[in-house]
Amino acid sequence: MTLSLNLASLNAFVTAYSQSDLFGKLIFLGLITLSIVCWIVLLHKIWLVRQVRKFSMAFRENFEEKKELLFNVDINDFPYSGIKEISNPFKEIFSSLKDKTLEILNKNLFFASQKTSQNQPQVYLSRTDLELIESHALTIISIESKKLDKNLFVLATVITLSPFLGLLGTVWGILITFAELHSGGSASSNSVILGGLSTALTTTVLGLLIAIPALIAYNYLKNSTKTFSSDMEDFLYELLSNVEIQYRKVDFNE
């Protein structure tokens, strides 16, 4: 029963396409192209976001076991995808924070060694140093968030364009129908009238069938990337708290 309904629906679309005029066929082809592009981007982005989350969560779980020795952690020991397109934002955040912190500590060590006779004076991070590290890491989060949002504009475009293209087909089909009726509807023009009506109805349905999944996927992906950006910030502040505990000099006059 379901198979026969699906075949009947497919046959209705094929019939509507075959009965439409040249401009109507172009509208059909435009809608089909939008549908193909939409599903390619949709499926690829959902797969990509899930893979990024998977490897980032694996990184965090492994990191929790080694975070007591923060800067002795070797990021090469953590799982990675092996696919360049699948980034690991948590790994990038940790790596950038580690590099920037060590850079500032080395700078502080250099200036401290100029002021003291000790061979290896103790060095600390000031509040300004911590703010600089945080600012640098937030830039990395912004970059990684943009990577996750890449190509989402395609879905946003499909959401807007496909109903309008379907509406154009609707108006064009009705226009063809009224033009034939106005010309005096002969037996030969009945097929043109039916073709105009089928074009009007079918393009409307196609436009909605394309826009609805695109809208659902777009909202899902935007919410996923927003949530993941929040997770990245949580991870950053967890790292910063560990850095502050280990390297910030306590000022009792504060």
Image: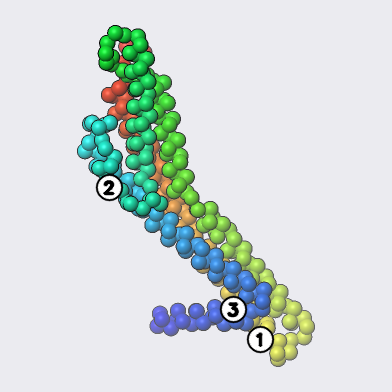
Secondary element under disc 1, as helix, strand or loop, is: helix
So how many labels did they put on this image? 3
In the picture, the quarter occupied by the C terminus is: top left
What residue is disc 3 on? 17
What residue is disc 1 on? 191
Classify 139 as above or below 176: above
Dot 3 or dot 1: first in sequence order is 3
What residue is disc 2 on? 79
Left or right of residue 221, residue 171 in this image:
right
Q: Residue at x 68, y 82 (%)?
A: 193
Disc 3 and disc 2: Cα gap in Å? 51 Å
Q: Residue at x 41, y 49 (%)?
A: 224
Q: Nearer the viewer, residue 12 or 75?
A: 75
In the picture, the quarter occupied by the N terminus is: bottom left
Place of residue 26 in the rendered image (x, y in percent of width and height, measured from the top left)? 63, 72
Dot 3 or dot 2: first in sequence order is 3
Please tell me in which quadrant of the rendered image residue 190 appears.
bottom right
Classify 20 as above or below 61: below
Secondary element under disc 2, as helix, strand or loop, is: loop
Classify 250 as above or below 53: above
Q: Residue at x 64, y 74 (%)?
A: 24
Disc 3 and disc 1: Cα gap in Å? 13 Å
- Amino acid at dot 3: Tyr
- Amino acid at dot 2: Pro
Place of residue 136 in the rendered image (x, y in percent of width and height, measured from the top left)? 43, 31
Left or right of residue 86, residue 21 in this image:
right
Secondary element under disc 3, as helix, strand or loop, is: helix
Disc 1 and disc 2: Cα gap in Å? 63 Å
Q: Give neighbour class at mark 2: few <14, some 14-19, many 20+ (Cα, 10 Å).
A: some
